[in-house]
Image (cartoon, rainbow, N blue to C red):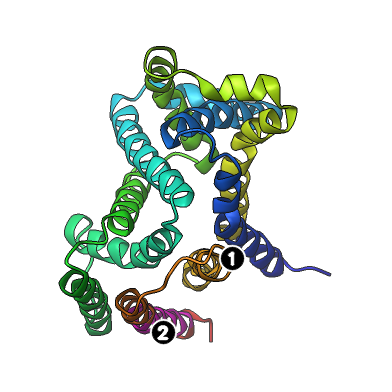
Amino acid sequence: MITERNKGFLFAISAYVSWGFIPLYFKALAQISASELLVHRVLWSALFVGCVLFAFKRLPRITQHFRSPKTLFILACSAFFIAVNWVVFIWASNNNHLLDTSLGYYINPLVNVLFGLLFLGEKLRKFQWLAVVIAFSGVALQVITLGKLPLIALTLAFAFGFYGLMRKIVNVGAMEGLFIETLLLMPFVLIYLIFFTEVESFSLARADWNFALLLLAAGPVTSIPLMLFAAGVSRLNYSTIGFIQYLAPTIVLFTAVLWFNEPLVWQKAVTFVCIWTALAIYSIDAYRLSRKYSTTTAPS
C-alpha cells in the first residue's frame, strides 16, 4: 500500500523533474520570441487553470480575493515577478544560457534565506550565515574573473525569490493564486499581442498543427508541475522538499553541458562548487534542526 508520504515523494519528484526538463519545451518553440511565448504561457495557463478550478468547483473561491484590495495588490506584485522570471527563463533557454538558469535556481534557496532575514524578521543560524557567505563568494569570484555579473542567474533567483515572498504573505491557494495572477497579466499581454508584435506564432500555428498543439501545451506545461508540487508539499516536511528542489537545476545543468554542449568554463564551475557547498551546509543544518524539533516534540 502506498503511504501518503510515498505519494508526496512521487508528486514532488515529478514536479521538479518536470521543471528540470521544461527548457526542452521552450527550445521546441524557439521560432518565436520570448515575449510572444510569454503571452501564450499566460493565455493558455489562465484557460487551463480556470478549467481545473471549474472542474473541482473551486471557482467561487476566486471572488472573495477580488473583494480584497490588499490581496489583489500583493498578487499583482507576484504576477509581475513571475512574468519577469518566465520571460528571462524562456529567453535564456532559447539563447544557449541554460547554465545561467541552472545557477539561478541553485542560488534561489539562499535568496529566500536572505529575504527571510530582511523582510520577515527571521534569524540566521551560524551555519546559514556560512552558507550565504560561501555562495556570495562564488558569485563574487565569477564577477572578478569574468568581469561581469551573472545577470541572468541573479535575475531569475531574485525574481522568483520576490515571487515566493509575495505568495508567502498572501493567504491564497496555489491554483487560485496562479489563476488570478494570469488574469491580472491578461490585459498587458493582450495589448502587447495586438499592438506590439506581428503575431508570428499564430501564422506558424495555422501552417503547422504540431506547432499549434505545442502552443496550447503552454497551459498544462506551466500548471501541472505546480499542481504536483502543491500535492507533494502538503504530504512532506518542508526540509524534505528543500532537498528535492535541487533536482530541477541539476537536470538543467547536465542537459546544458551534455545535450546542448554549453561550455562550462572554470569560473562558472567554481561558482557552482561554491553554491553546492553552500546548499549542502544549509540543507544539512535545516535537516538537523528538523530532526531535533521532531525529537523534542515527539510524545513520550
Q: CA distance from mark 1 to mark 2?
A: 31 Å
Q: Position of residue 63 (x, y in %)?
A: 48, 21
Q: Which residues are magenta?
A: 277-294
**Residue 284: assigned label:** 2
In this rendering, the label closer to the viewer, 1 or 2: 1
Disc 1 residue crowd, few under 14, some 14–19, many 20+, Cα 10 Å: few
| Residue at the outermost right position | 1
Q: Position of residue 161 (x, y in %)?
A: 32, 54
Q: Main secondary structure of the magenta part?
A: helix
Q: In the rendered structure, does residue 73 fall within the stretch colored magenta?
A: no
Q: Which residue is mark 1?
A: 259
Q: In the rendered structure, does residue 281 fall within the stretch colored magenta?
A: yes
Q: Is residue 264 above or below residue 76?
A: below
Q: Nearer the viewer, residue 186 or 36?
A: 36
- Give the SS element for disc 2: helix
Amino acid type of the residue tagged 1 in the rendering? Trp
Amino acid type of the residue tagged 2 in the rendering? Ile
Residue drawn at the location 74% of the way across and 68% of the way down: 3
Q: Position of residue 126 (x, y in %)?
A: 22, 84
Please tell me in which quadrant of the rendered image residue 102 appears.
Answer: bottom left
Mark 1 and mark 2 lie on one chain; the one further toward the N terminus is: 1
Q: Nearer the viewer, residue 153 or 1?
A: 153
Residue drawn at the location 33% of the way across and 31% of the way down: 76
Disc 2 residue crowd, few under 14, some 14–19, many 20+, Cα 10 Å: some
Please tell me in which quadrant of the rendered image residue 81 appears.
Answer: top left
